[in-house]
Image (spheres, helix red, strand yellow):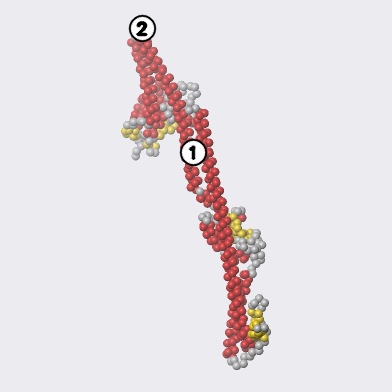
Amino acid sequence: MSKKTLVYIALTMFMALAGLISVQIYWTRSIFAQNEEYLKVSVNEAMQEVATSLEDLVLSEQMNRIQNHRRLMREIDSVNRILADWRQQYASVLEKPGGIQLDADGRYRLTDEPVMRVEWRDTVAGVQFSGSFVQADYTSAYGLSDVQKDGIRQEYDRLVSYRDDLLYASCMIDKLLRASWREAPERELGQRVAPRLIDSLLVSALDARQVRTEVEWGVFSTYSGKLVLQKSGDYGLQLLQSGFHCRLYPRQRTEYPFVLYLYFPDRLGFLVSQIWYLILASVLLFALLIYTFSYTLVSIWKQKKLTEMKSDFINHVTHEIKTPVSTIALICESFDDPDVHYDEEGLKNVLHIIQHENQRLQSLSSQIIQISKMEKGDYFLNKTRFGMHRAIEEAVNNTGFQVMHNNGRIVTRLEAENDEVYGDRTHIVHIISNLIDNANKYCTERPYIEIKTSDVEGGLQIDVKDNGIGIAKSNQKKIFEKLYRVPTGNKHDVKGFGLGLSYVASIMRQHGGKVWVDSELKQGSVFHLFFPQDD
């Protein structure tokens, strides 16, 4: 797959993903807007219900006051008649002559004039008429004892006191009924409505419409231009800017009405909670799609890189095989050439060349088999308990000749007190040998290799330090990948297939350990191996 095709696939997948996300965002926003509109309608309905309920309560209270006032006035009229009768009958005893007088508004009141009610009836043209009028009365206390006179005075005073109490109550109710909104609207509102009542009615109305969130309210007076009642007093400006308002007592004609304002501090959170399941599902689906698309692209990219590396590997292996095969073929041809004669020393040299080239072919075949095993993870590990220090010495002996051939030196500092590990000794010797071999090959000076062991928390650590060319930071994470070789331009001074370090990483994973590197260009490298140890 070409790089251009991969770019087209990535763009297509990105456009499809962006389209799906855009459509989902559009529908989510539409549902959010619908819920917001439903909230506005529900809140307005609830406010209208509260305003109507408050007005009904006020009207009911006013009707009760009117009925109580009428009842009191009737009671006062009744007491006035009784007092008038007493004053007419016992004027000389009470020293309060007079009776009652009917006012224009139909109410009876006492008068100081000595009067007496007189009933009359008459017939005119066959129709009977009746009525009453008052006239002077000059009754006396003739025949009453002093005790009787005192009793009459006390009873009269009691009735007067009772009548005065009734008049006071009537006056108070009358003042409440005649209170003007224009004169004292805030005071009248405080008398009419209790804050707890407003809060209770609002919560009940909103709850009935499934609006269950914190609500702040306030009552604004157009007479004073300020909020005269508030729930908490912390959201004055927000209340006036919220957009939720309703006139209180809408059926009352007044120049300065009261306005009820509502504000929801957690309005956004409430709206989101209505569609949280949709948002959660969308986010999960988006995450799954993004992960799937990313994983697919990364897999394709890795597969492309792996294909390229395998192609390079095959070309490299083919080139490497041609050299020993050609050498062996030339030697075989020389044996058939009658002009070529070998003495004993020459035959030894030829056989040594054939043996060397054969070893190269065996090495190549073993590395090809190693690639297959690495891809399948098909390593057979014969794990036993062994001493790591002896394994390191064996690896040094296996590779020491090549290092000495380059006038190099290997130094071991085996300082771990507990060097026993559980693993496959053969594979572990091989990976240490690989690290020594790499340190020897990638060195432009006399190789100096230092191998150190130390006890660390939870296991044993091996550090293989060299004075080689080093590895750039950008390549350090890739060197443990299969077939990866650090780019060196068009120069291929060091033979290899990019298998050694990936083999090291694979073996360490299967032993439950890990491998990492610290390196800088031209400063050498330190490879760290960690092997877990059982307590």
Q: Position of residue 38 (x, y in %)?
A: 55, 52
| Vertical position of residue 56 compared to residue 374: above or below | below
Q: Position of residue 529 (x, y in %)?
A: 40, 33
Task: Look at the image and tell me in which quarter the C terminus lies.
Answer: top left
**Residue at (53% x, 36% y) in the render:** 15
The residue that disc 1 covers is: 290
Q: Secondary structure at mark 1?
A: helix
Residue 245 appears in the figure: yes
Q: Position of residue 68 (x, y in %)?
A: 58, 73
Of marks 2 and 1, the one in the foreground: 1
Q: Say whether disc 2 or disc 1 marks the residue closer to the N-terminus.
A: 1
Return the residue found at the far front: 126
**Residue at (49% x, 38% y) in the render:** 290
| Vertical position of residue 402 compared to residue 518: above or below | above
The residue that disc 2 covers is: 338
Residue 382 position by quadrant:
top left
**Residue at (48% x, 36% y) in the render:** 293
Q: Amino acid at mark 2?
A: Pro
Return the residue found at the far top: 339
Relative horizontal placement of residue 157, taking residue 519 as reference (left or right): right
Return the residue found at the far bottom: 143
Relative horizontal placement of residue 133, taking residue 418 as reference (left or right): right
Q: Secondary structure at mark 2?
A: loop
